[in-house]
Amino acid sequence: MLNWLRPRMKLEIQLSLREAENAIERVPGVCDGEPVFRGTRVPVSIIAARRRQGATPAEIVGGYPSLTVRMVELAEIWTAAHPVLGRPPQLLDLGATVNNAKRFSLPLPPGKISQAL
């Protein structure tokens, strides 16, 4: 009974992914080459993360007027098809500098040592 549904679902998924690929682009110099919606500076990863955190498409569109509800859906589809690989970049890799590498311990009041362990 569901055999006819599987090819249809597969086709719908392929069409949605193709639509997402057409709506999303990487532009050197825009958001450090992060994927953004075509013609905007809105990173796809930010929109998908907001959805994962529980924001509704209407809330997201309210915060980003250049987006539509369909674009929010496409962000979820695109990020599911293109997972981020590898470790997240470290601050030093992003150009941050260490001002002070000295480490120190905060003094504990007398009698509080057993609680710290």
Image: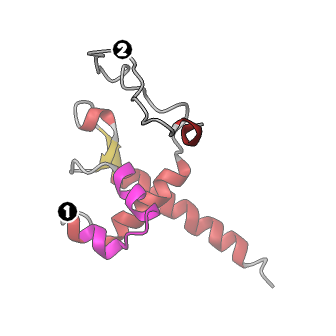
User: Which residue is at a point 77% across and 81% down the rendered structure image?
Assistant: 2
Secondary structure category for the residue under label 2 = loop
User: Which residue is at a point 34% across and 64% down the rendered structure image?
Assistant: 71
**Is the Cβ of the residue at disc 1 closer than 8 Å to that at disc 2?**
no
Q: Where, quadrant-wise, is the N terminus in this rendering? A: bottom right
87, above or below 50, in the image: above
Residue 50 located within the stretch drawn in magenta: yes
Mark 1 or mark 2, whichever is nearer to me: 2
Amino acid type, mark 2:
Lys
Write down the region rendered in magenta. 45-61
Residue 66: mark in rendering = 1
Residue on which the image places disc 2 = 102
User: Which residue is at a point 70% across and 78% down the rendered structure image?
Assistant: 5
Camera-nearest residue between 59 and 114? 114
Secondary structure category for the residue under label 1 = loop
- Can you see residue 19? no
